[in-house]
Amino acid sequence: MAILNSGGVVSTATENGGGEFVDLDSLRRRKSRSDSNDNSPSDDLGPPDDVRNRIDSVVNDDAQGTANLAGDTEIRETGGGRGGGEGRGNADATFTYRPSVPAHRRARESPLSSDAIFKQSHAGLFNLCVVVLIAVNSRLIIENLMKYGWLIRTDFWFSSRSLRDWPLFMCCISLSIFPLAAFTVEKLVLQKYISEPVVIFLHIIITMTEVLYPVYVTLRCDSAFLSGVTLMLLTCIVWLKLVSYAHTSYDIRSLANAADKANPEVSYYVSLKSLAYFMVAPTLCYQPSYPRSACIRKGWVARQFAKLVIFTGFMGFIIEQYINPIVRNSKHPLKGDLLYAIERVLKLSVPNLYVWLCMFYCFFHLWLNILAELLCFGDREFYKDWWNAKSVGDYWRMWNMPVHKWMVRHIYFPCLRSKIPKTLAIIIAFLVSAVFHELCIAVPCRLFKLWAFLGIMFQVPLVFITNYLQERFGSTVGNMIFWFIFCIFGQPMCVLLYYHDLMNRKGSMS
């Protein structure tokens, strides 16, 4: 039933669709007489007992200050199968929505208004965008294949001299020597064989050798581009892990030495098992133990691995079918017509964005989750909602959580504890990131133009500019500027610069 309190009148609608209007004052008098003599029936004709009980509740609420129940009343369609009786034969076709019930009960915003658009789900619009993207891009792919044919080639990824890449493969395997060396150093200091300054010096030697050795091997061998990038990425990961292991062990050792009398539970120990788990775990921050999951979901791993294969193939298809022809048919963006360079960058921006999104999904979502599942690694916050970044600073804090946590833990806060200003600490963190970005790209290309280094360092002023714009104009403007810089100005320009410099280098060598 539906009950409407409008002023001093209550409208009751029973389950069979009937209803009547009853004056609240008379109901109060009737209720007081009924309460004074519960055993004697009332002389007044009123609603049935079940309706009267609910009206009494409304009267009591009204006496306590309830002004209007219409705003919270649900208008429901009654069902015909709950009860019995002849009076309910047509109840399934009867509605309790009477003409007297208000249709407009409170002030509301339209779903797409600026005040309400971010307070609701947009899953349907997201599905629509996915359908439109699939339809539009499918047509473009078919049109490209009909016009240009199959352009896929493998010599960019795996050259005909791929067997000559075995030094890089052996170098990847030999990187395991450096964690063992770091473990040996920690074992020696635990047994008091070496002092703290010697430990620091040995860790510096180990980490520097771990970086310079793969760089030397990559530059000496005429290897494929993909092999060089893989080796340099693995080198950077191992270096970050070694630094975290040495820094964390030093801090735990300091706490243990300072807490000998205050807290006996703080102790320093060296475990080869914990180090081995850390070196393969999807994290860059060392700690003796990690949160663990209960079991391995084999079916889930198989599904994620199938997605990894599919999206990796799609990423390679976009690179070979779209990006390579665009960059091959372009001129150097800094040595030609400005309008022509802008046109090339805009044409390259969309396929480059697709490749980057596929790379992010394959590595940060699929591969890291597969690795975490196989190792029962519990903390799987490998990224946050960076697509909602309100500034460039928000993007760098959210899109790569393993590196962000490492930077905060081993660069940013140590700088602040050393009384370094916050702005300078941010610059130092970006400087470390820029050096490793340059190593991962310049060494496999054998081309040191510092484009990647400058591209990362250019983010520093953008962080402060977009923070100011966010505070001045709101989050929407900051997010739009982030996407513009991310999609159009940054990555496509770097791709064109490195490609043409690489082609010029090969031309001069030939």
Image: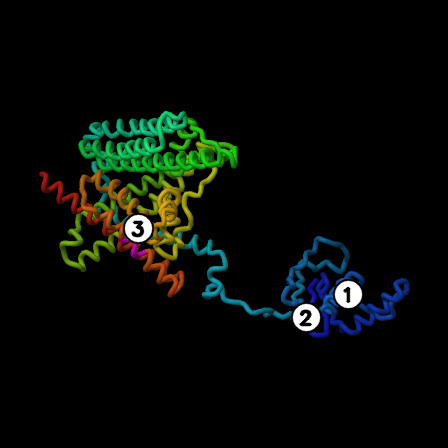
Q: Is residue 326 left or right of residue 462?
A: left
Residue indicated by mark 3: 427
Find residue 272 and report its horizontal and vertical position in percent: 41, 26
Residue at image point 36% right, 49% down: 419
Helix, strand or loop for the magenta stretch, by majority: helix
Residue 166 picture quarter: top left
Q: Position of residue 114 (x, y in %)?
A: 45, 65
Direction front: furthest residue: 261
In the rendered view of the protein, which quadrant contains the C terminus?
Answer: top left
Q: Quadrant of the N terminus?
A: bottom right
Tell me the amino acid under the disc marked 1. Answer: Asp
Look at the picture and state if 412 lies above or below 199: below
Q: Position of residue 51 (x, y in %)?
A: 76, 63
Q: Do the numbered discs 3 and 1 sit on residues whose CB atoms are within 8 Å? A: no
User: What residue is shown with label 2?
Assistant: 67
Local packing at callout 1 (Cα closer than 10 Å; few below 14, some 14-19, many 20+) is some
Q: Which residue is mark 1?
A: 56
In this view, 17 is above or below 378: below
Tag 3's secondary structure?
A: helix
Looking at the image, what colour scheme do you see? rainbow
Circle 3: residue type: Ile
Q: Earlier in the sequence, mark 3 or mark 2?
A: 2
Instruction: Kindly report the distance in space between the C-alpha atoms of the residues bearing marks 3 and 1.
Output: 71 Å
Please, which residue is most extreme toward the right here? 40
Pick whichever of labels 1 and 2 is earlier in the sequence: 1
Is residue 281 rendered magenta in the image? Answer: no
Marks 1 and 2 in Cβ contact (< 8 Å)? no
Q: Nearer the viewer, mark 1 or mark 2?
A: 2
> What is the span of residues highlighted in magenta in the rendered image?
458-462
At mark 1, the secondary structure is helix
- Whole-angstrom CA distance, mark 3 to mark 2, is 61 Å
Q: Residues within 10 Å of mark 3 (few under 14, many from 20)?
A: some
